[in-house]
Amino acid sequence: MLGRAREVIRREAKALELVAARLDEQICKLAEHILSTPALVVVSGVGKSGLVGEKISATLASTGTRSISLDPLDALHGSLGRVSAGDVFLALSNSGETEELRQVVWALKEQPVLIALITGRPNSSLGQVAHRVLDIGPVQEVCALGLTPTTSTTAMMALGDALALIIQERRGFTERDFARFHPGGSLGRKLVRVSDLMWPLGTIPVVRPGTQLAEVLVTICGAVRSAEAAVVLGGDEKIIGVINPRTIAGDLMGAQHLELEASVDPYIQRPPAAIQDNASQSDAFQIFLRNGGDVLSVEDTVGRFIGLLFRRDVETNSGMRCGGCVGEV
């Protein structure tokens, strides 16, 4: 059985080499058409081809191309209304004679819809009416009976991946774009940047050295967001340090008389460690884990202070705890 399992994989791999060699400009023309329009790519197939179509559609959608999968039977009973003028209908049929797809394509022929086909028989009925045909060739199924869709569906899926990725790369789809479509799970967390989680400068209370405590408290209370820290900036807009409002509040509650006209300078703590805004959430997590503290100073690529990153926000978004962090601002 082990030998047979290895043979199946090797035969399918060999078949993919043949599919790659057979590939022609049709895939480029289809990709260029999709790139040149806001078209929705509607992927459709029956049986195993339909399942492959769902995967192709999902890959297109996750890499920046609007796409849905559509069951041909549903399409024939009202769901064809999901296909609009200018869309691309991508059919999957190894034989090119799948009856349900033939009926759908027949219904779409009179509409301004581009019909594309992935098939092993480009001269089939569907191949004759399609505007773009991606030919996987006469692949032999590795099933001992020669019947179970195996090599053909593997070839279709690989061709779908090729289409999605050449579109993605030509579109200039970036890692940040990818992160927008994958906000959940470990993949999404890995792609989150510090700039996505930080508090920008405009949302943080900012004071200058020597500012009276009364003015500092008014600034903190008037912040756009409930602030966990105020920033002290020098004349060159460089960060001098941070102020923990809880420390001032504690002194206010515990003192008989607090000089609100006094300078804030005794409350200024040293500036926190810095991190660049394009660093990953994982980078920030490691700094918190290594250094402790509740906050990082965020800088742009030329070293200008642009915001704060709080440990709490990193922990909430990552679903992990920075063990060993302490309560200093």
Image (cartoon, rainbow, N blue to C red):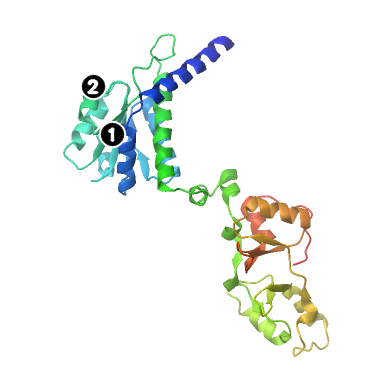
Q: Is residue 96 above or below residue 243?
A: above
Q: Residues within 10 Å of mark 2 (few under 14, many from 20)?
A: some
In the image, is 141 to the left or to the right of 233? left
Residue 320 image position (x, y, % from top left): 68, 50
Q: Residue furthest left?
A: 110
Asked where in the image residue 87 lies, by quadrant, the reply is: top left
- Quadrant location of the C terminus in the rendered image: bottom right
Q: Which mark is residue 116?
A: 1
Question: Residue at position x 20%, y 43% from top?
Answer: 112
Residue beneath label 2, please?
123
In the image, is 223 to the left or to the right of 8? right
In the image, is 174 to the left or to the right of 315? left
Q: Residue furthest front?
A: 302
Disc 2 residue type?
A: Asn
- Asked if marks 2 and 1 touch (Cβ < 8 Å), the reply is no
- Quadrant location of the N terminus in the rendered image: top right
